[in-house]
Image (cartoon, rainbow, N blue to C red):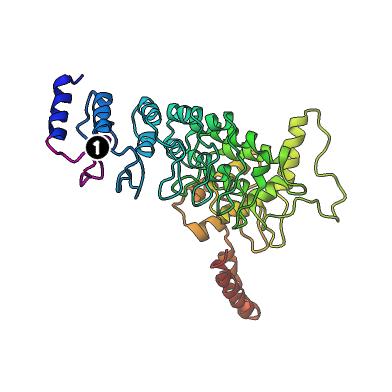
């Protein structure tokens, strides 16, 4: 712990004319150093030195540049996101810092604390009157930032303290959507508690489309974590948009209709004693229904490289050996579009009857070339298939 000697040294420098608000090339002032914000060489008696600097005229509201990759933030913003205890935030507020002061992006200290998951700092800011649903220039709240960075503790705390989970940002995305997308645009690979909290807080957001027509439920299909998809699907079944079927939403508009064909007068399942078995049988029957191209849900998932959905469907007994109108099974589609070395292809290889499906559509086309009468038609068909590959 520094001593009075250190304070005396600082006071001597200030009395000799040192600029108390001088900006260091690294982007911080003496106050930042005293508070251990964004600079090395910390000062142990931060409170004593800070008091001295303020007494000598240091500007509490000085904005600094290039600290934490931001263009213009205050001491309070820096303290709210720094790896320090909440005592410094409390100190700055006691000295008159504005709890809702905006940075150049329109963000408050609460935005910064939420983004970094600083739970104790969030508590201090809220207790001191911070606007819990403050909007930045992109119409994003602190909850958006906490969700984007998958800060589960911060998300739960903000929700408990009354944050609105259904506010849309400038792109029409809610915190639930932000949590699934993540900061780097990668699929959510865990954090079930985070999804639980957001879905329970705002079940109506599951099927809420953003400005690009995307919903959190549809995004969940690209997640390799089966639990996430199943949880969101269950939430959609309970609270989803009227007439929107969960499996349809998961696969998109190209998913085969889940309605039983009119010509099929027989029930899709027979009565069984176990309700869960009946549900599983019904699911398999529906998932194996074909669309106009003869493709099942598994075909569509293979086409879109949705490993999580493929695994989910296979786990629930969906047939991987059903052929579409071109004679292709899901494995053929995966190989054609993604190659043999992709995880989705390897997964389908494990669950496909190789002997039964050893004859691929192109093999059949080659065989038919021996017949002169059909050679032209098959050539046209190959061109048709080739032309469609770009848009699959």
In reply to whether residue 253 is colored magenta, the answer given is no
Q: Which quadrant, please, contains the N terminus?
A: top left
Tell me if 5 is positioned left or right of 324 in this view.
left
For image coordinates 67% across by 53% down, the residue present is 296
Q: Nearer the viewer, residue 278 or 259?
A: 259
Query: What is the secondary structure assignment of the residue under circle 1?
Result: loop
Q: Which image quarter: residue 56?
A: top left
Q: Which residue is mark 1?
A: 39
Q: Is residue 371 above or below residue 196?
A: below
**Vertical position of residue 244 compared to residue 227: above or below:** below
Task: Give the residue at x 51% y 60%.
Answer: 337
Instruction: Please say whether residue 312 is visible from this viewpoint.
Output: yes
**In terms of depth relative to the viewer, which is nearer, 208 or 145?**
145
Q: Is 239 left, or right, of 313 in this rendering? A: right
Q: Position of residue 268 (x, y in %)?
A: 80, 44
Whether residue 315 is visible:
no
Q: List x then y, in percent, for residue 237.
A: 72, 40
Q: Looking at the picture, how far across and down is residue 164, in whole percent?
A: 60, 38
Compared across the picture, whether 87 is left or right of 202 comes to left
Q: Judge the density around disc 1: few (<14), some (14-19), many (≥20) Cα neighbours within 10 Å.
A: some
Determine the residue located farthest toward the right in the rendered image.
Answer: 265
- Magenta stretch, main secondary structure class: loop
Side of 128 where 7 appears, left or right: left
What x and y, as percent, mark residue 284?
A: 71, 43
Query: Which stretch appears magenta?
Result: 16-32
Task: Give 118 or 268, whichever is nearer the viewer.
Answer: 118
The vertical placement of 262 against 227, above or below, is below
Numbered-mark total: 1
């Amino acid at each position: 712990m520094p001593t009075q000697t250190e304070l005396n040294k600082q006071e001597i420098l200030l009395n000799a004319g040192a600029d108390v608000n001088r900006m260091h090339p690294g982007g911080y002032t003496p106050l930042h150093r005293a508070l251990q914000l964004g600079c090395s060489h910390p000062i142990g008696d931060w409170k004593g030195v800070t008091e001295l600097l303020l007494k000598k005229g240091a500007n509490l509201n000085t904005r600094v540049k290039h600290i934490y990759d931001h263009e213009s933030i205050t001491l309070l913003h820096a303290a709210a996101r720094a790896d320090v205890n909440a005592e410094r935030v409390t100190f700055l507020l006691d000295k008159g810092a504005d709890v809702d002061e905006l940075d150049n992006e329109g963000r408050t200290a609460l935005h910064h604390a939420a983004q970094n998951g600083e739970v104790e700092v969030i508590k201090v800011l809220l207790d001191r009157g911070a606007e819990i649903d403050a909007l930045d220039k992109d119409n994003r709240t602190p909850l958006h930032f906490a969700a984007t960075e998958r800060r589960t503790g911060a998300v739960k705390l903000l929700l408990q303290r009354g944050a609105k989970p259904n506010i849309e940002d400038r792109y029409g995305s809610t915190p639930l959507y932000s949590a699934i997308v993540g900061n780097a645009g990668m699929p959510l690979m865990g954090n079930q508690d985070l999804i639980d909290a957001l879905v329970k807080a705002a079940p109506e957001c599951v099927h809420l489309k953003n400005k690009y027509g995307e919903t959190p439920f549809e995004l969940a299909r690209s997640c390799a974590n089966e639990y996430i998809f199943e949880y969101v699907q269950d939430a959609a079944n309970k609270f989803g948009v009227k007439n929107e079927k969960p499996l349809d939403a998961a696969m998109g508009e190209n998913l085969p209709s889940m309605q039983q064909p009119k010509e099929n007068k027989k029930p899709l399942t027979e009565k069984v004693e176990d309700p869960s078995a009946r549900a599983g049988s019904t699911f398999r029957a529906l998932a194996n229904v074909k669309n106009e191209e003869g493709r099942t849900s598994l075909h569509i998932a293979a086409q879109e490289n949705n490993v999580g959905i493929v695994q989910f469907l296979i786990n629930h007994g969906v047939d991987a050996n059903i052929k579409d109108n071109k004679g292709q099974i899901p494995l053929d589609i995966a190989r054609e579009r993604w190659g043999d070395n992709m995880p989705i292809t390897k997964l389908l290889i494990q669950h496909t009857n190789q002997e039964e499906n050893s004859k691929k559509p192109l093999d059949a086309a080659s065989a038919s070339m021996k017949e002169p009468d059909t050679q032209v038609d098959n050539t046209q068909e190959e061109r048709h298939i080739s032309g469609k590959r770009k848009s699959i």
